Image: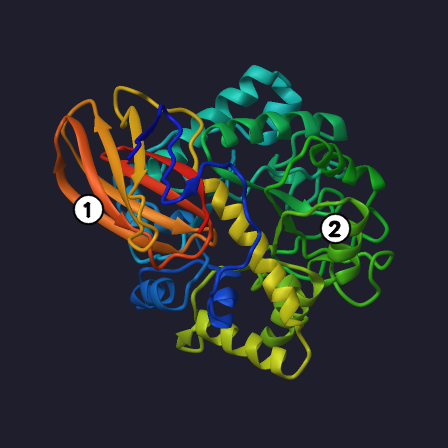
Amino acid sequence: MTEMTFKNIYSLAAFFILAFILSSKNQAQTLDEKIGQMIMVGYSTNNGFEDTLFYDIQNRNLGGVVLFAYNIDSPVQIAALTEQLKSYASTPLLIATDQEGGIVARLDENNGYIKTHSAYKLGTVFNIEDSTRAQASLMASWLNDAGINTNLAPVVDVDVNPLSPAIGRWGRSFSSDPMTVYQHSAWTIDEYENANILTALKHFPGHGSAETDTHLGFTDVTATWADSELIPYQELFADGYSGMVMTAHIFNSNWDENHPASLSANVLNGLLRDTLGFSGVIISDELFMPAVSQNYSFEESVILTIKAGTDILLFSTNERNGSSLVAEVIDLVKQKITDGEISINSIDESYQRIAALKSTLTGIKENNDELIPNTFSMQAYPNPFNISTNIVINLNEANPVEVKIFDVTGRLIYKKKYATMKSGRNVVRFNADNLSSGMYIVRIDIPGKFTTGKIILLK
């Protein structure tokens, strides 16, 4: 019997081979669960649907929750809330907010944080790398401490129209120069990636020239949009950006004579994926915004958004007509698949992209050897008919410990809590007999810290 020990990178084996390869193989989830992963909702604590949200996470495999300012009272409260939300999830949950800085900042001086600079001030007034990085790093630390793993930012709109009612007027764009927008966005993204926070570039294909506001109604940019608004996306994609892109509810007859960008296959599958080569997750802007809701029924908006190539549908609420919006969307999409209006292949592809994105949340960039286990080793009994593994955890000091193992989709397959593990060597027995070959992720938590590793099991 041999024991394999690694420092700061952790592996488990039962006839296991250590590897850092992300498998795209689709693990068994039902169609309902796959569709559930494609939905992100907000909620209000005052409408009686908080319990419905918990039920949707636990029983409908809801993929994400977006938090607004009215959900956040204080740093302590939001950390407790996100921990509660995650406790209902068997698949890692995207917990998102809009933390751009400036006027669009859900964490601010009103709920226990501090006022932040707008993108315009960072990119045009200061235009200094250190200032942009410093603010992004600060806000990333807030989100990390709050348990929020997704920031619906940065805005990469070019400030074509300084009076644009949704962007320029509020200083939400870094600059009127596309390359400056790119540079500051890249620095911002880098700081969030260092903190293991997902980001979303917005609002594709560019909202900066608009003369009206999609939050208020139909917005036509046919006469104002410029090709230069694509430059930040092109540059970021060339750098290897593979996070999320949020779509805009703007209309341009040169792209699509019938639908706004967010509902247009020409724009999303055509321009964004085929022309620009983006292969990551596409998330819609909020689908109850009047630019959509005043021109399309709820059913039409859901169907067209998915057919256009969107992976995650964003809604500001989890309630519609007194019932669960999540359940309604799942039932609607299943029916449209049966009717042949939505391709089941598109659901599988979206699900796989979401699963791949979520798998990046299982790692951390920096480990503190004084606070987390500094060695973690595995061993397997040699009898192939009794596949069990000893997970050996060495701690610098006694701590409560939680062990979790996930499959490649992020589905929790093993979880065990220990009230206290002693300083030194601790052994956890894990039976892998019922697991198929493939990649698995093991996560070890102690108070305030965690560490993870990716492994491949071969049988």
Q: Element at badge 2?
A: helix
Determine which residue is flagged by label 2. Answer: 273
Q: Is residue 409 left or right of residue 180?
A: left
Q: Please name the amino acid that badge 2 sits on.
A: Arg
**Labels 2 and 1: the sequence-earlier one:** 2
Which quadrant of the structure image shows residue 208?
top right
Residue in the picture at 54% in, 18% down = 131
Q: Is residue 149 visible?
A: no
How many residues crowd around disc 2 within 10 Å: few (fewer than 14), some, or many (20 or more)? some
Question: Relative to 185, is 201 above or below?
Answer: below
Residue in the picture at 61% in, 37% down = 172
Residue in the picture at 26% in, 33% down = 448
Q: Position of residue 409 (x, y in %)?
A: 47, 54
Determine which residue is flagged by label 1. Answer: 417
Which quadrant of the structure image shows residue 427?
top left
Residue in the picture at 30% in, 26% down = 375
Q: Please name the amino acid that badge 1 sits on.
A: Lys
